[in-house]
Amino acid sequence: MLLIDKYAYNNKLRDYNPQAKFFLACVGLLVFRIIDNEFLYILNIVFMTGVTVLVAKIPFKKYLDMFKIPFVFLIMSLVTILISINNTDYIYSIHIFGLDLGFTYESLLKCKTLFLAVFSSLSSIYFLMLTTPMIQIIKGLKKIKVPGLIIELMILIYRSIFIFLDEMHNMDLAQRMKFGYENKRNSINSVSLLIGNLFRKILEKNRDMNIALECKLYDGEFKVGD
Amino acid sequence: MKKKDLVRNISLVALFSLTPQITHAMHIMEGFLPMKWAIIWGVLCIPFLVMGLKAIKKNLGKGADEKMLLGLVGGFVFVLSALKIPSVTGSCSHPTGVGLGAILFGPTSMTVIGLIVLLFQSLLLAHGGLTTLGANVFSMAIVGPFVSYGIFKLLKGDKKNPKMAVFLAATLGDLATYVMTSIQLSIAFPDSAGGMIASIGKFLTVFAVTQIPLAIVEGIITVIVYNLIVQYKEEGVLDIG
């Protein structure tokens, strides 16, 4: 159900040293982002895409689809940065509501660089998350001395995500078969019912799991990640 | 404090103050913020996280099950963000009435859960990012929850109309997140002529198109879920105090 998670466990680079993969992603995410050079960004995009698609064997079409996820946010923010109000040296501008709206040469350049920066960072992070299973990431975090409580909570949350995804999927399917999402009114009602039921599940699962833990002589600490 | 109260309180606070913000608010994408601002927002989150960890730890000594509950609540919040329903957005609610005055886990411990959920969102759903995690935690797991929590606390004296309190808390919490994100973006990218103020105006206007209807829909859903949970409670389906 979580496509990215599925690929993280089924790719050719899965067993490769996680520290090396993390280091490689960090170069693109941190070092190149600080240097802020367009040539390096393009280099990073080409390299990361190459490694992800050709070496790790992630299907290229799915990989491209992933770039659509943050696209709306990107376009809206870029347009906002591009347009400036009541400036003087516009290349192109319109006059509405008593305001001069337009874009300047500098803002155009800034947007171009930012666009490349975002795509370079995205290709780095996609490389990391498509080739590294979550358990390896959690182990890595444990190694760099992230507080034990956070690690424990991460593992518990990771586990319960799949419990709830399954529950949600079943409920959603049942609702769709009964035309629960036919129109807006129904949709809002169905979503609310689904959420209310999921909430009930939290309390149910909590009770069940506590019984299970008590049976296993749980003493307040999960020994995980070793 | 009885164990049952604890269970009730954690889930209520989480539902009510965390879910609307994190599920469908604006996640600043990977690499969008310059490194300087990514670091500054990250550092600003640290005191809240420390407070949250302390709050959780303080209560852990009393029993074992809170950790499990927090884990389940985190999974729940994450899953709601994976709900894919066109033009309708998921969010959640919070049954009022009983014992909210006795809330143990304030919004601070939810900051910790918010951090982990946002991390998973960026790694499993490609919402948000690692470098922008600090900024996203600040707007979605700190500002939003504190605002809705505060509004609910303020309005809950009004026993006659708890629905309005729920609606306002969810909607305004959502709007607070949207305003905070706009501010974060405009500090990082000031307008070349008008400076930061003009930039805030620009971002607020552009994102209003998607965020204001969203906030209202989430408010409505929150009220319906709230009613549902109250109904469950009255019928004895739920054992939450």
Image: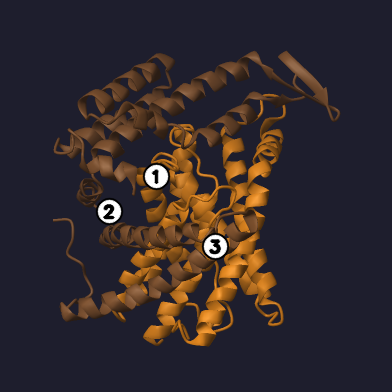
Residue A53 vs B70, above or below: the answer is above
In this rendering, which labeled residue sits more in front, label 1 or label 2? 1
Describe residue B60's horizontal placement relative to residue B143 as left or right: left
Residue B132 vs B69, above or below: the answer is above
Q: Colour of chain B?
A: orange
The subunit letter for the residue under badge 2 reads A
For the residues beneath circles 1 and 2, the answer to whether they share a chain is no
**Residue located beneath label 3 in the image:** A190
Picture quarter with the C terminus of chain A:
bottom left
Q: Is residue B147 visible?
A: no
* Residue drawn at point x = 36 percent, y = 28 percent: A61
**Residue located beneath label 2 in the image:** A146
Q: Residues within 10 Å of mark 2 (few under 14, many from 20)?
A: few
Label annotation for residue B150? none
Residue A207 location in percent, x, y? 32, 79
Describe residue B125's horizontal placement relative to residue A145 as left or right: right
The subunit letter for the residue under badge 3 reads A
In this rendering, which labeled residue sits more in front, label 2 or label 3? 3
**Residue located beneath label 1 in the image:** B125
What chain is colored brown? A
Residue B125 location in percent, x, y? 39, 44
Q: Residue furthest front?
A: A178
* Residue drawn at point x = 25 percent, y = 41 percent: A8
The subunit letter for the residue under badge 1 reads B
